[in-house]
Amino acid sequence: MGSADEERSLLEAEVQAESRGLYTGDGSVDFNGKPVLKQNTGNWKACPFILGNECCERLAYYGIATNLVTYLTKKLHEGNASAARNVTTWQGTCYLTPLIGAVLADAYWGRYWTIAAFSTIYFIGMCTLTLSASIPALKPAECVGSICPSSTPAQYAVFFFGLYLIALGTGGIKPCVSSFGADQFDDTDPKERVKKGSFFNWFYFSINIGALISSSLLVWIQDNAGWGLGFGIPVLFMGLAIGSFFLGTPLYRFQKPGGSPITRMCQVLVASFHKWNLKVPEDSGLLYETSDKHSAIEGNRKLEHSDELKCLDKPSVLTDAEIKSGDFSNPWRLCTVTQVEELKILIRMFPI
């Protein structure tokens, strides 16, 4: 009987080991939320669709942004100072909206659906912008000699509505695409971890290819063939970007949203305040962390303890009352090491 039980245990261990080799170890799932097989998903099989999406999206963005001051001065008849101010404000907005997209992706929607939703907004904005440059009623008449009629409030409204829809749309794409590409590689697999570095090389190469084409060819088309066509081509490429992204859906690996990082960081600060008088143990193994192999943060792996900023380790110190009751469920009083390390990473980035 004993030998049969031992054989069964060995067989189960072998099956588990084989499963660990077949499935990803970073908690990623497929589109239906099931564990994913390495050989069928992610890796370089999924990356061409993500790289194609990024290349086309950057071509579309720079196709609008590069020559925007010229459009405002020559077609909407703005002064140089006003045009430069409007473009600078719009570009600043493009770099602020990723804060919205990042929070939505991490806390609620996940990267895939954030990219999908904001890409649609982006595409609508580009269509609106193209229409405003193509339909005579939506743009002011051409200059006659030195007399240039001003744009009407309605014409301005349509143009800037489209422009700021693009700013909102890029806020969901910019912070998510590179991370979503990184999700296609299993961090627990040394071979895939090496490939992830190569992915980022190709990712930035794709960005530069898109920027190069838009800054040269598209600018020439806008100046010589017309703004309707010059804005229409970026619309076409944005459509290709969306199509490329959705086409790879069956091959993608997905990470589940892990909740708001802002909330988790506030929990660490509140717990630090409540435990300010506790002493941090010398042995970091005594600090609180979940016992299983997965992190308490959904879709994230555990982070190892670091010796820097040890004052922030106090939220992970177990009090006698917590040990006695066995209740570790209040994140505003007790935080995991991973949660504390998340805040440490952010603080270490401040000097940058």
Image: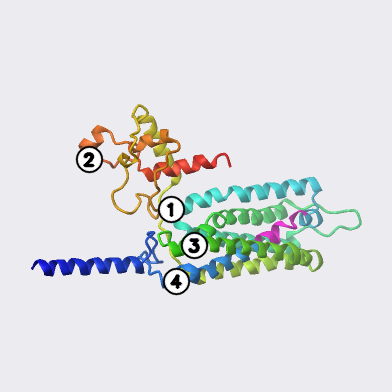
Residue bearing mark 3: 194
* Residue 213, image x, y percentages: 71, 66
* Residue 52, image x, y percentages: 58, 68
Residue bearing mark 1: 108
Q: Which kind of residue does numbered mark 4 sit on?
A: Pro
Q: Answer yes or no: do the residues labelled 3 and 4 have beta carbons within 8 Å?
A: no
Q: Which residues are magenta?
A: 61-69
Residue 250 — which label?
4
Q: Earlier in the sequence, mark 2 or mark 3?
A: 3
Q: Residues within 10 Å of mark 1 (few under 14, many from 20)?
A: some
Q: Answer yes or no: do the residues labelled 2 and 1 have beta carbons within 8 Å?
A: no
Q: Earlier in the sequence, mark 4 or mark 2?
A: 4
Residue displayed at 73% across by 45% down:
85
Q: Earlier in the sequence, mark 2 or mark 1?
A: 1
Q: Estimate the spatial distance between the alpha carbons at disc 3 and disc 4, rounded to whole Å.
A: 23 Å
The residue furthest right is: 145
Picture layout, residue 61 above or below residue 239: above
Q: Nearer the viewer, mark 2 or mark 3?
A: 3
Q: Residues within 10 Å of mark 4 (few under 14, many from 20)?
A: some
Q: Which kind of residue does numbered mark 3 sit on?
A: Val
Residue bearing mark 2: 326
Q: Nearer the viewer, mark 3 or mark 4?
A: 3
* Residue 186, image x, y percentages: 43, 62
* Residue 59, image x, y percentages: 66, 64
Q: In the visual, does 297 lie left or right of 198? A: left
Q: Estimate the spatial distance between the alpha carbons at disc 2 and disc 1, rounded to whole Å.
A: 30 Å
Q: Secondary structure at mark 4?
A: helix
